[in-house]
Image (cartoon, grey):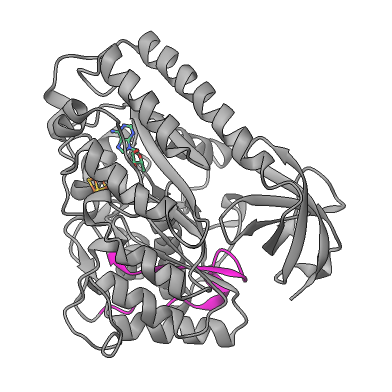
Amino acid sequence: MKSKVYIETFGCQMNVADTERAATGLRQSGYEMCSSADDADVVLLNTCSVRERAERKVFTRIGEIRAARPNDRNLVVGVMGCVAQLEGQSIFSQSPTVNMVIGTRATDRISSLIERVREGERKVSDLGERREEESWDVSPVERHSPHVAFIPIIEGCNKFCSFCIVPYSRGRERSRPASEIISEIQKLKSLGYKEVHLIGQNVNSYRPRTEQGIEGYPGATPFCRLLRAVAATGMQRIKFTTSFPRDFHPDIVSAIEEHPNLCDWIHLPVQSGSDRILKAMRRGHKRSDYLEKIERVKNSTRQLSLTSDIIIGFPGETEDDFRETIELVEQCRYDSLYLFKYSKRSGTPAASLSAIVPEEVKTQRFLELERVHRRIQEDIYRDYIGRTLSVLVERQSSRSETDLVGHSTCHKVVNFPGSGDLEGEVVDVTITEAKTNSLYGTMRGSN
Ligand code: 5AD
Ligand code: SF4
């Protein structure tokens, strides 16, 4: 009988994509994938370490999984992803029931690690690099959704923002050949996928080794050329994330203006509105550079939805620095904003900074900025009432059996009444109500 593997995924879209890749490889090697830890012979936790809380979750989960099957000596437990890469062998001492530590570039070697455990080695690890010839192929059955596909275009990060662990957990930037990306999207289109997300820690740092796939496509940077090449595949909806402000070229906005299938949404994390803090964060951009890029976004001939990430309470952040962040948020008027309290990550340059912002100050600032953003978001969302948005129906709403939920091209969550057979369709929805972080409407028809 085939061994059953269950992968539980934490964290970002890159982890979701890695899980899909790992599952593709495991099935090819003869394993069966299952959807619950209770049914599995092998449980893999694909972990995130971007903030301390995410990291702690894994160890709690391992405890729960072992506690549910206390006498099952055959159950193999593995930790993969960022925590595995960073903590390495020390995971075995922190959590003695773990059998495998699988680094972020070992996703295609999991089956041989499982075999080694089965043959009697109780603790195995692989923190090595990717094989040069490794396949990025993902089988459609392993994708997290039959309608929306994540496509990694660049892995890793070379930016070394002082607060961030990602350059250590995911290594240096490696771009995937454009020809491969294009043919994957063509395949997804023929399978009926309606939306793709080009993903990477910094999509606009995309720099493939060859021209293959982007020859003949103009653009100020390789990413701008890739956007135009991907648009030419005719895939119905194309989104991309995350953009890094310093490398965000205005030609990205021009490409969006030229191609209606490049969606009207840009996620451009600013992290702080204070030049002093941006410098300490080593972001490589000033407030004014960022605002200049935003001006191009706001002046676009298409109305573009804008979202961002902000860290509150970076070491040394004063009340004045925080006021500058509030002002920037008021100026940028984000459609959505992800706020994070600064979390110290050991091994990063910021971890040695001593001017810690007390937890209660972080909380107070968090709540204040949330209030400011919420008011702006309410105005933006209210403006959608009466407008018709194109929505990709993703699933039934978890809150109501008669409602469906999907995303608009501008990446807003839209709920509306409708029957389940519309799943996977792109429909027009006229907005009737603005809620916190979502819109509600009625369907006009499908297209
Ligand atoms: N503390 C808090 N937030 C962080 N992020 C990254 N590192 C940290 C940290 N050490 C946030 C950033 C990034 C998002 C994915 O996570 O805002 O854009
Ligand atoms: Fe982290 Fe900065 Fe790289 Fe983003 S750009 S992954 S915040 S180091």
Horizontally, is 442 left or right of 236 in the view? Answer: right
Nearest the eye: 225 or 294: 294
Camera sees residue 334: yes
The answer to if 139 sits in the magenta stretch is yes
Residue at 41% x, 79% y is 230
- The quadrant of the picture occupied by the N terminus is bottom right
**Residue 64 in the image: above or below residue 432:** above
- Where does residue 67 sit, x and y in percent of width and height? 53, 35
Q: Is residue 127 magenta?
A: no
The range drawn in magenta is 134-154
Q: Position of residue 314 (x, y in %)?
A: 26, 24
The residue nearer to you, when weighing 178 against 82, is 178
**Front one among 225 and 49:** 225
**Residue at (28%, 82%) from the top-left corner?**
218
152 vs 398: above or below: below
Quarter containing the C terminus: bottom right
Q: Is residue 315 above or below residue 136?
A: above
Left-right relation of 225 to 132? right
Quarter of the figure with residue 157: bottom left
